[in-house]
Image: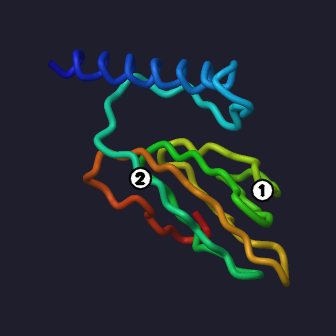
């Protein structure tokens, strides 16, 4: 039964991906451009949650982890992000990044002193664990 659920989930995701890319090929005047992609292990997720995060100028979040896969797209402004031991990277509106399950997100901040910034994060989960798990900054 578990294998069947996984197979149905993988098929559904594949169909949606194909539809989304095909949609930009003549359905209208829109252009569909993939901005983030990650190969995920075959497993069924119980929940997908989208959250909007708004940062005031200079605002920062605490270091944290997520139990599942995370896809992030910057909506406006600029957001600086650093995963694991990597140096911080600056993402501008329209740019995206991916976080693996359990990966340490050391830095998330708005580097601007005058402009706000916003992002949307899609978090996949098993619906049993807290989506954002704060950690110590020295981990």
Q: Do the residues labelled 2 and 1 touch (CB within 8 Å)?
A: no
- Specify which label sits upstream in the sequence, 2 or 1: 2
In the displayed structure, would residue 30 be above or below residue 137? Answer: above
- Side of 56 relative to 129 (left or right): right
Name the spot of residue 109 as percent of width and height, x first: 71, 70
Calculate the distance from the C-alpha at mark 2 to the C-alpha at mark 1: 21 Å
Name the secondary structure under disc 1: loop
Q: Residue at x 49, y 28 (%)?
A: 40
Name the spot of residue 9 as percent of width and height, x first: 33, 24
Say which mark, if any, is on residue 115. none
**Residue under label 1:** 93
**Residue under label 2:** 49
In this rendered view, identify the residue nearer to me: 61 or 57: 57
Q: According to the image, what is the colour scheme of the structure?
A: rainbow
Name the secondary structure under disc 2: strand
In which quadrant of the rendered view does residue 29 lie? top right
Q: Which residue is drawn at 53% across and 47% down?
A: 70
């Amino acid at each position: 039964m578990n294998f069947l659920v996984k197979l149905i989930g993988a098929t559904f995701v594949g169909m949606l991906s194909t539809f989304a890319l095909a949609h930009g090929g003549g359905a209208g005047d829109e252009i569909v451009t993939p901005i983030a992609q990650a190969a995920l292990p075959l497993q069924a997720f119980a929940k997908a949650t989208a959250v909007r995060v708004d940062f005031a100028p200079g605002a920062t979040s605490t270091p944290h982890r997520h139990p599942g896969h995370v896809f992030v797209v910057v909506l406006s402004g600029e957001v600086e992000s650093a995963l694991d031991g990597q140096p911080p990277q600056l993402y501008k509106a329209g740019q995206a990044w991916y976080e693996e399950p359990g990966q340490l997100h050391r830095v998330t901040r708005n580097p601007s002193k005058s402009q706000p910034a916003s992002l949307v994060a899609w978090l996949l989960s098993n619906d049993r664990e807290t989506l954002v798990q704060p950690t110590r900054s020295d981990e």
